[in-house]
Amino acid sequence: MSPPESGWFEVRDIPNAGRGVIARCDVPAGTLMLQSGPPAFHVVFKLYGKETCAYCFHWDRGRTLPIRDHTTAKVFCSESCRAGWAQEQGKAGVDAWLCLADFLRARGRGTNADEEMGDGARPQPGEIETAWQEADRQAKILRVSRESKTPQSKLDRKATLAIMRKIGEAIDSDVLSYLLCGLLYRYKDPTRWADEVLSLAMDDEPYKTQKDLESNCNSYLQLVSVLPLELLPLITPELCRTIVRADNHNAFGIRSGGEDSEEYMGYGVYPSASYFNHSCAPNLKKQRVGRQWQFTAGLDISLGDQCCISYLGGDERDMNFEDRQRRLKEAWGFDCGCGRCTDERPG
Ligand SMILES: C[S@@+](CC[C@H](N)C(=O)[O-])C[C@H]1O[C@@H](n2cnc3c(N)ncnc32)[C@H](O)[C@@H]1O
């Protein structure tokens, strides 16, 4: 599938902006150009988890939703959403969410990833490598303890307990859910994973702070320690790293109402929607409709034009040239070279 194709557009290389979406013909304003399909992986933050339908992301201004599944800790707005979710997860998926919910219940806590990110510089590739090598060393000990049919030696038991104690000190339920969602996507369809996810623009410095990196390594070890044995071979540092490397340049915020609404409930990666570049004067509108995103021509688009969305939200679009450039650099890591920025660039 990668990159997506359509009668309306094709994906091509764009100078200084990787790949982008180019109109194949004249497109009248109001044309629906792409409907994304559901996210490959996503997270609804713990803060919103009890109020947001786990399947269609419906949020009813904080009101309790009618269907609550206490075993998986998921809520749904209807029986059909509950059934859709269960079918999408499959047996292995539902079992894995049960294990994670049990683990979190036993610990009685779990933080919201975005609030608990801490401060400091982005970890560099060397630091990231070292942290994951150490996590994998510890994971090997946990794997042996879970998979071995013979009792562990006293020394090995001590090592396992020490790791369990250490990783139990910091639990980030948002990172855990996000990684689990990604690894179930990979589990269900390795070909689709390779085709859709591995072809996305990846970020090699995806962890926002040292705490974020630690939280991801810890979550990896926690998943190794709790998930069903059949998933163990799949839970690798490489997979956990790819899930996060893929989101930084590609994730869409899941918000309650329109795209500028206050309630930021989570985010997700929608591979087919990941080829639209940003413009400070976008010609596409995007709208979340349940589990999907719709991309509609906001004005008449001519054959050969690049089709762009805005990565800026709400008031950010009214910023001046310098502030927009700074914001896009901080949040997305690029120097915007869109038509509006080229026109407004001083000198
Ligand atoms: C969602 S991806 C868009 C598709 C991407 N160009 C690709 O090749 O996969 C977002 C990334 O595209 C690039 N990008 C998007 N809009 C841009 C712009 N206006 N100027 C420069 N780079 C841009 C940045 O690298 C950004 O992190």
Image (tube, rainbow, N blue to C red):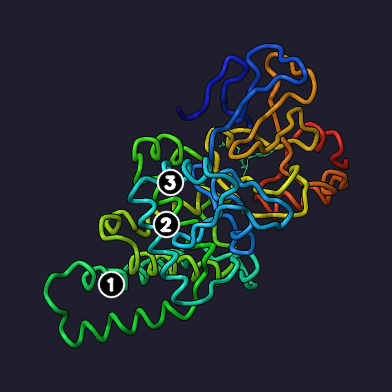
Are the residues at dot 3 and dot 1 in contact (C-beta closer than 8 Å)? no
Q: Secondary structure at mark 1?
A: helix
What is the x, y in percent for residue 304?
68, 17
Dot 2 crowding, Cα within 10 Å, few <14, some 14–19, many 20+ = many
Which-is-in-front pick, marks 3 and 1? 3
Residue 330 vs 336, above or below: the answer is below
Which-is-in-front pick, marks 2 and 1? 1
Left or right: residue 295 versus residue 89 is: right
Q: Residue at 59% x, 50% y: name it.
A: 53
Quadrant containing ligand 1:
top right
Are the residues at dot 2 and dot 1 in contact (C-beta closer than 8 Å)? no
Name the amino acid type tagged 1.
Leu
Which-is-in-front pick, marks 2 and 3? 3
Label 1 sits on residue: 142
Label 3 sits on residue: 86
Sequence-wise, which precedes: disc 3 or disc 1?
3
Sequence-wise, which precedes: disc 2 or disc 1?
1
In which image quadrant can residue 188 be found? top left
* Real-space CA distance between mark 2 and mark 1, rounded to the nearest whole angstrom: 17 Å
Q: Which mark is residue 303?
A: none
Q: Secondary structure at mark 2?
A: helix
* Real-space CA distance between mark 3 and mark 1, rounded to the nearest whole angstrom: 29 Å
Name the amino acid type tagged 2.
Cys
Label 2 sits on residue: 240
Residue situated in front as seen by the camera: 99 or 234: 99
Residue 343 vs 173, above or below: the answer is above
Residue situated in front as seen by the camera: 229 or 210: 229
* Real-space CA distance between mark 2 and mark 3, rounded to the nearest whole angstrom: 23 Å
Sequence-wise, which precedes: disc 2 or disc 3?
3
